[in-house]
Image (cartoon, rainbow, N blue to C red):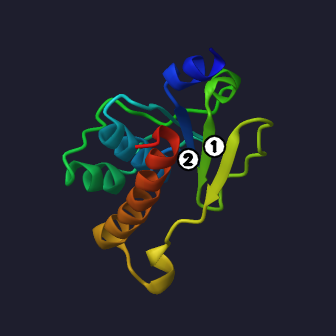
Amino acid sequence: MTQETSAAKKPSVLFVCSKNGGKSQLAAGLMNQLAGGAVTVHSAGTKPAQSLNSQAVESLTELGIDITGEHPKAITDEVLAEVDAVIVLGTEAKLSPIEGTRFEVWETDEPSERGIEGMERMRLVRDDINARVRKLYTELTGS
């Protein structure tokens, strides 16, 4: 009976970055599109910004993903208590692992270290995160 119950529960993930304006929003948008409702997706920041990174929004729009209405959010105890996985994107956000919850830090590609800026940079960051999200989706859903 326990296996049936856990199999029926929809997996959930929290993507975290420092400002919740770029990388974690990218990951959430990509996972939402890929999962089509099969995974509950949250995003938050350790120090939420005032607004989303416009290049992050534009890079998702290029893939047909609309995150209009999203805004930077702080991490809440309620969300931390309900998710199966916490994914920290980049090295700026500092968060301690939560007992019994899958916890990963994704050191994402940072093209600006190679002199790549603007939309070219954002597309590279998006594509790096997209590859990781696809792998995570498969692991969470067994699909």
Q: Secondary structure at mark 1?
A: loop
Q: Which residue is outermost to the front?
A: 1
Q: Is residue 129 left or right of residue 106?
A: left
Rendering coords of residue 60 (x, y %): 28, 50
Rendering coords of residue 96 (x, y %): 78, 45
Residue assigned mark 1: 47
Residue 127, which numbered label?
none
Rendering coords of residue 14 (x, y %): 56, 37
Residue type at mark 2 is: Lys
Residue assigned mark 2: 19
- Using the image as rendered, state which of residue 48 and residue 82 is in the foreground: 82
Residue at x 51%, y 41% (from the top left corner): 140
Whether residue 50 is visible, yes or no, is no
Residue at x 49%, y 71% (from the top left corner): 109
Q: Are marks 1 and 2 in contact (CB under 8 Å)?
A: yes
Q: Is residue 107 left or right of residue 36?
A: right
Q: Whole-Å distance between the Cαs marked 1 and 2?
A: 5 Å
- Using the image as rendered, state which of residue 104 and residue 108 is in the foreground: 104
Q: Which residue is outermost to the bottom?
A: 114
Q: Is residue 93 left or right of residue 64?
A: right
- Using the image as rendered, state which of residue 73 and residue 83 is in the foreground: 83
Quadrant containing the C terminus in the rendered view: top left
Figure check: 81 above or below 89: above
**Of the image marks 1 and 2, the number of the one nearer the N terminus:** 2
Whether residue 58 is visible, yes or no, is yes
Q: In terms of image quadrants, where is residue 86?
A: top right
